[in-house]
Amino acid sequence: MQTRKKYIFLTFLASWLLLFLFGGDQLRRFSFFSGRKAEARRNWPRWTDRSLLKSFADTEELQRDGDPSLLSPRERRAAWLSVYGSSRCRMETCFDFSRCEKHGFKVFTYPQEQGQPVSETYGKILSSIERSRYHTANAEEACLFILSIDTLDRDHLSGQYVRNVDEKIRSFPLWNGGRNHLIFNLYSGTWPDYAGDVGFDIGQAMLAKASFDTQSFRPGFDISIPLFSKDHPQRGGDRGWLSQDSVPPKKKYLLVFKGKRYLTGIGSGTRNALHHIHNGKDIISLTTCKHGKDWEKHKDTRCDKDNIDYERFDYQELLHNSTFCIVPRGRRLGSFRFLEALQAACIPVLLSDGWELPFSEAIDWGKAAVVGSERLLLQIPSAVRCIHPERVLAFQQQTQFLWDAYFSSVDKIVHTTLEIIKDRLSPHRSRSRFLWNALPGGLLVLPDFSTHLGDFPFYYLQHGYSPSRKFTAFIRAVSQAGSLSQPILRLIQAVSGSQYCAQIVVLWSCEKPPPSSGKWPQTAVPLTVIQGRRQLSHRFFPFEAIQTDAVLSLDEDTSLSTSEVDFAFLVWRSFPERIVGFPTQSHFWDPEQGRWGYTSRWTNELSIVLTAAAFYHRYYHSLFTEYLPAGLRELVDGLAACEDILMNVLVAAVTKLPPIKVTQRKQHKEAVAQQAECRDRAAGTPPPGQRSPSAPHSAPAEVKGTAGSRRFSQRQNCLNQLAEWFGYMPLVSSQLRLDPVLFKDQVSVLRKKYPSLEK
Amino acid sequence: IMCASAKYNTRGPALIPRMKTKHRIYYITLFSIVLLGLIATGMFQFWPHSIESSSDWTVEKRSVHDVPVIKLPADSPIPERGDLSCRMHTCFDVYRCGFNPKNKIKVYIYSLKKYVDEYGTSVSNTISREYNELLTAISDSEFYTDDVNRACLFVPSIDVLNQNALRIKETAQALAQLSRWDRGTNHLLFNMLPGGPPDYNTALDVPRDRALLAGGGFSTWTYRQGYDVSIPVFSPLSGEVDLPERGPGPRRYFILSSQMALHPEYRLELEALQAENGESVLILDKCTNLSDGVPAVRKRCYKNQVFDYPQVLQESTFCVVLRGARLGQAVLSDVLQAGCIPVIIADSYILPFSEVLDWKRASVVIPEEKMPEMYSILQSIPQRQIEEMQRQARWFWEAYFRSMKAIALATLQIINDRIYPYAAISYEEWNDPPAVKWSSVSNPLFLPLIPPQSQGFTAVVLTYDRVESLFRVITEVSKVPSLSKLLVVWNNQNKNPPEGSLWPKIRVPLKVVRTAENKLSNRFFPYDEIETEAVLAIDDDIIMLTSDELQFGYEVWREFPDRLVGYPGRLHLWDHEMNKWKYESEWTNEVSMVLTGAAFYHKYFNYLYTYKMPGDIKNWVDAHMNCEDIAMNFLVANVTGKSVIKVTPRKKFKCPECTAIDGLSLDQTHMVERSECINKFASVFGTMPLKVVEHRADPVLYKDDFPEKLKSFPNIGSL
């Protein structure tokens, strides 16, 4: 043996021995000692008289629970308020529920005052509220009030600091000691302690504040919001960056940080220690001393080297290529970094003790972030290394979901704030924690529709439910009063022939009354006629009559066979959250025009399924009517043929998935069919039976007559307006169609379940 | 530092380096010395402890009355009052807990003492039955340590469950003289009945400085969120009365109130409800004319009718739990046990374990102001949800209320999760009843992502020795535009793969992996070489698929990245005669499986197949050299709850199932074996996860009357 090797060997040995002697604690946990240990362990004694011990309270005492106390419940509530005052406000003491009873949850924003400009960010917040479906212009019916004074930046050294807020507020007749008011704030306090107070008396107002600390946070009353930059988009917002799911995560770095190192002052404790975990390989933790004007005064020996290292890495590059990102406190508890990491699918490792996490009333951060302790910084590397790769993948996906559901735009942040408050007003009609933390997120789930998970299209698999086995055929009729057209009669026959049809509902959208009940065909399933309004959006009203999960939406001149309906329904049951239907259209980006184009040509892709013949979940009626603001529905009613595009856009925005096209027979109604109004029809449109099917691949623009081209341009216009309103284009394209397994295969027709689809 | 989680081998199954003999000797010597050292350490570490047992802890039988008596001088120190601003990061010493591989806190219990004041009068009952049960439970749990120096959390044996049963000042003095008290840091007190007349504070009045409080009946003002733990008030009745679980469904009464001590104001409101809604509302009170010997606590009366308590709770859908003098009520436990949905009317009450339990799933919380609307609020709850809430209520009782042990362990787990948040128990584990856990799936690829087309896919060809056919497959597959890499898994140990120059020249990288053993599972190993999410598993004789068909398959996979997307489809059927599952390869209208002789899937499933396949399926498949594809179908369906997607029309495949066992023709025995696989796997999974569907995916314009040259995938379905 070579001498050198011998030494290495000996050192190795010695270190092992040392490890064993001093690492005994760890070793004790080894299983082969446990048997021995159990004997030696001194457990809590098994007392001989343990069965004779007295109970901690006898049953009588428990059930009587003292004497009914002298204070009446009402008096007690009043006493709480006086005892705890506004600094310890709770909904039951500081919020006037009665204001919300008559008109529901309505939010009023104070009118802008002359000469009182608000910052860009506060402007965005106000406009988000005004875009919300809860906004009201009438202070009388309001339940919640939002000030027009910009309270976002309460650092009195800042240029946007508004002075004399107290005085201004006291002059508002509606202020009422702050009751039912919500105050937004992003920055509070200033050098050196950055204390949490906003510098004026908020009274009994709720505070929606970034960097909230757990001590001043009034649980169930205040709301912690994330810190966001003034460039945060008003609506829409960028998608998350996660584009692939891989196990183990294929990222270059495990853990990164790049930021300032405070040499002095609050927050410097943690920031000063961050460089310790840097290993230059998979953990990159870079700090610079350069910040503020006089950093060189406090400069220490590390600074020069650190500053050089700091420049060698790019923040964005680190963000893109790391599995975990350290999000330490800055001077304040929250930082921009938090949302940046969330968007980048870089799992936030929070080092911000005492930070009340954003929307923690709703969001379960344990699923998306590692909540570390500032005191245990040095344990972080080993802790994150030990997180199981599957859990890392789940974390990454959850960051993306949360980012997209609650944070990617000012709209989402503000609307989440409002929904959390609304949920408090009626706890029995509120979202459970599960709903907030599962796709598609709390904003898209309306507790007013139902509080039962099985009533929504999203949770079947997670809770072992399945969608109902029957559907409701929902036909919108616009034909002349007095007699029913041939197509609608054929349609009713075909649909009622389906073994899965539970009922037929006809929405009579003419002003003239529907034919008397005797004129309707006899069907095996119940047929209901509802008198509807003429507005196109009314077809998506959540009618009580619709009792099944599945709705088959139909126009009266749609032609479908029973087999088509049967097959499509079975497909829908596999994809209950999507629209499943027959005629389709698609959208595309038109770079020349710089806007979205729309086509009903036969193409290799599809992104819109016409609701003239489509299955979807009845919840989408509620979402369409309740969730979308009235303005959008007015837009749709103003354009002649936009409501089905809006429905598709809505479902795509919820699911992030394309609709599904199923097999249809050749003679299907042309996609460009008229959504004729009663009056148009009276003016002499040919009855549907005589309409010759136009060449399938003719663009609508080429369809004879101006009606077609006007319709086409309206739809294109509609598409662009919707994309504008949503802030992005939610529609997703698909390249496939679902056919029966043996569709057009060379097998005997007798073997096939749906032979008629092949004709 | 050791990780609790296993580290996975990402290299591949083959490469086991052979050590040189010389080195081996070193290693063996090293190992034996290490072993010796280990044993020595063991002796050193554990010998002294076992002989050191002090008189407090003798194993022999003792009575609680024999414990040492401690006299508290009148002037012994009293701790500060509880600090309302305490949070884990300010008042808790995490350094005591340390980083440990199991992510478990260590809990120490002080030995039992009897405390008396200067005059010899005892400070409290030595210990109650419940507190003894609680300490026994902790002592029997994984959290327990008998070594005070290694403890992270300390539990005094001083019983403060019921504030009325103790003397406040003296109890506080007793706490202060505990050996590791240190202002109460890391000490945990359990209290169920806080406060006393007349104002009934909602937290224990005993001054306790920084100690954590597990309290029943916190209000939002006394509860230090993230520091204290809200626990239930244990109901001793649950040990005495056995209420078997009742199936969910309609019950005789809609609303029931069973509490005896209600404030008259509440009782008036309840009676108004009853007057309005009649028989469906039952308001019970204590019985006034019971004969002697009948325990009043087990009876309730309405006018002259007598009801058994708590059995009567099972007769109602909703049970009112109103605040009394205290916020926490033992009746909550009885109500949950009866599977009755609690209607909680106690403003500002912090519900038990609210940090982790989602009470909206098991209860209805109604603000006190809204009591008159209670009936209509409850009426608006859908029937299906009522049934679920009934189940959930019962489950909460079974898991977290039924015994002092359940309460103790839930409390410790909550504190544990705060200290090791990255190893915390999830929402689902806390809240989902076993039935839901069993019937539900949590898809590991839950985010709706459509992977970018640019990523492409990796084709993995499993081959043994059919080189000619293999080369044809490689040539064919290489024509697919989205192919980004080709991986050949050479499963033949007796023969070397052909030389590099002989392989077909293709436009993408081609890698050959040699395996150590001829196992079918090699095809599903998550090789590092697979850099794309999409994997195309393809046999070395599948040459009939056109480039359009493969490309289209990839596009379909992109839209369904969490599913198996494949070509030949198969079906499982229930054979009523034989009473078992049967495998079907005939031309059917349904599919439930696709063969992995040609299928796209996510690389994640390779990882699952290799490391997370339940039971012995993986070995079984390798031993039988069959059914690896069925196993993969089971695995994916089980974890996602979704069906496979079969793409493109039926083709004449050359008995794809036979490729595993070369030369075997499609015959009866083969089908029998495949059927057996299905039955075997269904029993291992404990369920039949496969989903049957009637659809397949075709290009949008497939067989449509449209010029072929304008279609994206014209060459589909040719035989």
Image (tube, rainbow, N blue to C red):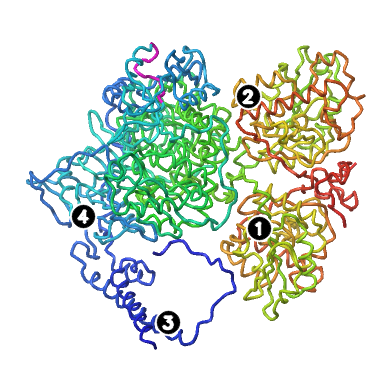
**Could you tell me if residue B230 is visible in this image?**
no
- The numbered dot on residue A625 is 2
Helix, strand or loop status at disc 3: helix
Disc 4 packing (10 Å; few <14; some 14–19; many ≥20): many
Judge the density around disc 3: few (<14), some (14-19), many (≥20) Cα neighbours within 10 Å: few
Chain identifier of the residue bearing label 3 in the image: B
What residue does disc 1 label? Answer: B634
Residue holding disc 3: B27
Q: CA distance from mark 3 to mark 4?
A: 51 Å
Residue picked out by circle 4: B112
- Check if mark 1 and mark 2 are on a common chain: no
Chain where mark 4 sits: B
- The amino acid pointed to by label 2 is Thr
The reply, left or right, for residue A595 in relation to residue B705 is: left
Give the secondary structure at mark 2.
helix
**SS type, badge 4:** loop
Q: Is residue A418 magenta?
A: no
Q: Are marks 3 and 2 in contact (CB under 8 Å)?
A: no
Q: How many other residues sit within 10 Å of disc 2, few (<14), some (14-19) or many (≥20)? A: some
Answer yes or no: do the residues labelled 3 and 4 have beta carbons within 8 Å? no
Is A603 situated left or right of B347 in this image?
A: right
Give the amino acid type for the residue marked by disc 4 in the picture: Leu
Chain-order first, disc 3 or disc 4 = 3
Q: Nearer the viewer, mark 4 or mark 1?
A: 1
SS category of the residue bearing label 1: helix
Range shown magenta: A173-183
Name the amino acid, label 3.
Tyr
- Asked if marks 3 and 4 fall on the same chain, the answer is yes
Residue B370 figure quarter: top left
Residue at 54%, 58% (x, y): give it: A248
Cα–Cα gap, marks 3 and 1 = 43 Å
